[in-house]
């Protein structure tokens, strides 16, 4: 009877709506006239949420000619207005002052010691108005020989970029994090020798986008743990089942992903499932990994609906993880969400503090992002960093398979925490250097209290960090004379063992040894192509004479014949070339 009543009410509502409909059209821009996409638009009458498109425009159906809407975007002041369907709605959002006391403090991705804020101000160009991260610039090696970066296994940026391009949409520059793009390919993995936890290999060559400069590669690899001897896992799946997850690329995709993960579990592992949405609570009490059918049945029964009370979901998940904590084990919460994260009455700062309280508890936090439109990349990334964990974005089932099946140990088993790499250059060979990727958020750079914080490195991970080098005359002369005995740089790794408190170190002395670009191993040439692709998407000022054709040519030359991920990368760059070329033609046409 109740169901029938609901149907009648729905039909009456539909009939009344169809009787008279109005269409609100408009656009959202910032103070400089730049279009703002993915702006949250709340329709007050219905409570429905809409988003502005890639060109900043929106279209909303209403059953009344005059309606009230609120517009909000992270980093901007909210705007509420009453609109008439007869008029085109133009909304202008003003950027939020960074001096506001309620602005959340961010952690730095990289840091050059003693580099004064006044010198960094010259880096703030027109992008300051609309970009949340700022590309690293060249640093004088004589004044500032030492720089550091936070390391992790995050690779979400690449799959998120792929999602945009596949949907024929321009990629927001803030979504491009070159270090995560390089992480995605796990290039040039070399098992560390003996009992060593890490291996470090460095290479110096010509910079392909500026032949006057050089490219310095640092390849770090972590030890591959044996799955059979890994400690038991205490896993808590924290799954967003709110109404916004009711799309094929959200909850159904996550259910498929978690089924893959369950198939990798052993009898000594355990799983609990906590959900938040229309219902918040424990859907499956802690269960042995040997009871796969029971776990998968609980996953299959998840149904989306309701709001997004993320704060209460997080509290329940940490409570379950604490109650079944395994000393010396792998205790981890896996948060899966589209990022439309409602924190109840708490501010974002308070939510960050909530996660940070558990950072030292030995419970890790892995975040899996899905969906689009209301997907909040920066929010999920922050949660992963605060929770001492990692972050991946699942745009399709193949990506879920890659992250949770093929890269199972990299994603879920840490070999080291709080990993931080410091590079000290020899000014005799390096005039200036620029770290490619590891770009900091503008707010973090401006904040005098910001600090760098190391990340989590998983089992069997390989990462490549790149520095663009302006060589000294001594450097150029050494290449000419084939001189290879001088010290080029010192690379120092600082880290802790999982759940440990003692700081450990790994040191590598890098000799001056130059290899012409054409003689480089293919994996290093390919990593340069990945960095070039990311730089083009960010419209980097450092690639003035490089275009899509150069990236495609280099990627085709250096890719592995049977490497499907690298072949897909080439296809992605080709799609981007068409997409961005069309955009330029349209601009040219409008200018005329």
Image (tube, rainbow, N blue to C red):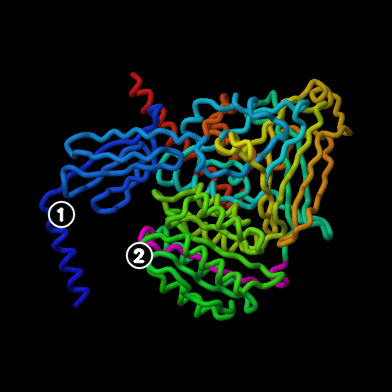
Indicate the secondary structure of the residue bearing disc 2: loop
Q: Quadrant of the N terminus?
A: bottom left
Residue 179, picture quadrant: top right
Residue shown at the point (49%, 69%) measured from the top left: 274
Q: Quadrant of the C terminus?
A: top left
Between the residue at mark 1 and the residue at mark 2, the CA separation in whole angstroms equals 23 Å
Which mark, residue 316?
A: none
Horizontal and vertical percent for residue 324? Answer: 61, 74
Q: Position of residue 198 (x, y in %)?
A: 77, 53
Dot 1 or dot 2, earlier in sequence: 1
Q: Is residue 156 magenta?
A: no
Decide if residue 174 is on the left or right side of residue 62.
right
Q: Identify which residue is drawn at 76% across, 35% down.
A: 146
Q: Residue furthest top?
A: 592
**Number of the label disc, if any, that sits on residue 17:** 1
- The magenta segment: 226-245
**Residue 236 lies in the magenta stretch:** yes
Asked whether the viewer can see residue 441, the reply is: yes
Looking at the picture, how far across and down is residue 152, in whole percent?
Answer: 65, 51
- Residue visible at 38% across and 42% down? 72
SS for callout 1: helix
- Which residue does the image show at 72% across and 32% down from the upper left? 114
**Left or right, residue 134 beside residue 189:** left
Residue 78 percent across, percent down from the top left? 37, 40
Rendered view: 176 above or below 585 = below
When asked about the image quadrant of residue 117, the answer is top right
Answer above or below: position of 147 versus 482. Answer: below
Q: Which residue is denoted by mark 2 in the rendering? A: 305
**Looking at the image, how many numbered discs can be counted on the residues?**
2
State the residue in front, 514 or 338. 338
């Amino acid at each position: 009877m109740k169901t029938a009543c609901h149907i009648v009410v729905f039909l009456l509502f539909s009939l009344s709506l169809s009787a008279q409909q109005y269409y609100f059209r408009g656009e959202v821009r910032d103070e400089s006239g730049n279009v703002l996409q993915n702006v949250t638009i709340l329709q007050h009458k219905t409570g429905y949420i809409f988003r502005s498109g890639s060109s900043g425009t929106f279209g909303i159906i209403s059953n009344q000619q005059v309606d009230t809407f609120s517009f909000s975007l992270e980093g901007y002041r909210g705007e509420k207005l009453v609109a008439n369907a007869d008029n085109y709605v133009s909304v202008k959002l003003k950027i939020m002052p960074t001096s506001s006391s309620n602005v959340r403090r961010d952690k730095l991705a990289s840091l050059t010691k003693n580099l004064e804020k006044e010198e960094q101000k010259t880096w703030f160009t027109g992008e300051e108005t609309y970009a949340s991260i700022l590309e690293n610039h060249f640093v004088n090696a004589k004044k500032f020989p030492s720089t550091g970066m936070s390391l992790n296994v995050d690779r979400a940026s690449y799959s998120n970029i792929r999602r945009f391009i596949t949907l024929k949409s321009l990629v927001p520059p803030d979504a491009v994090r070159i270090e995560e793009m390089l992480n995605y390919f796990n290039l040039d993995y070399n098992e560390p020798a003996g009992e060593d936890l890490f291996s470090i290999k460095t290479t110096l060559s010509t910079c392909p986008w500026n032949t006057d400069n050089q490219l310095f590669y640092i390849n770090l690899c972590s030890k591959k743990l044996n799955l059979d001897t890994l400690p038991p896992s205490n896993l808590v799946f924290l799954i967003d089942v709110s109404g916004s997850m009711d799309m094929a690329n959200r909850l159904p995709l996550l259910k498929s992903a978690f089924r893959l993960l369950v198939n990798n579990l052993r009898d000594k592992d355990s799983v609990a499932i906590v959900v938040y949405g229309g219902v918040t609570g424990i859907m499956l009490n802690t269960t042995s990994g040997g009871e796969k059918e029971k776990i998968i049945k609980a996953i299959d029964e998840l149904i989306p609906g309701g709001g997004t009370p993320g704060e209460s979901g997080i509290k329940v998940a940490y409570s379950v993880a604490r109650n079944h904590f395994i000393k010396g084990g792998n205790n981890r919460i896996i948060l899966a969400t589209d990022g439309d994260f409602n924190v109840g009455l708490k501010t974002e700062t308070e939510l960050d503090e909530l996660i940070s309280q558990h950072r030292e508890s030995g419970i890790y936090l892995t975040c899996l992002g899905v969906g689009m439109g209301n997907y909040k990349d920066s929010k999920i990334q922050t949660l992963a960093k605060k929770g001492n964990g990692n972050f991946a974005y699942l745009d399709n089932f193949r990506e879920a398979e890659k992250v949770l099946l093929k890269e199972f140990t990299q994603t879920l088993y840490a070999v080291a925490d709080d990993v931080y790499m410091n590079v000290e250059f020899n000014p005799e060979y390096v005039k200036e250097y620029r770290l490619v990727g590891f770009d900091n958020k503008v707010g973090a750079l401006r904040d005098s209290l910001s600090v760098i914080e190391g990340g989590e490195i998983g089992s069997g991970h390989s990462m490549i960090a790149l520095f663009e080098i302006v060589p000294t005359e001594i450097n150029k002369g050494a290449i000419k004379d084939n001189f290879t005995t001088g010290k080029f740089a010192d690379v120092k790794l600082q880290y802790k063992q999982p759940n440990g408190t003692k700081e450990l170190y790994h040191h590598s002395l890098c000799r001056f040894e130059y290899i012409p670009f054409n003689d480089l191993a293919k994996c290093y040439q390919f990593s340069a192509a990945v960095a070039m692709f990311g730089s083009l998407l960010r419209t980097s000022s450092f690639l003035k004479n490089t275009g899509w054709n150069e990236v495609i040519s280099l990627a085709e030359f250096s890719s592995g014949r049977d490497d499907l991920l690298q072949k897909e990368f080439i296809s992605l760059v080709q799609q981007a070339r068409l997409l961005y070329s069309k955009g330029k033609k349209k601009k040219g046409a409008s200018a005329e």
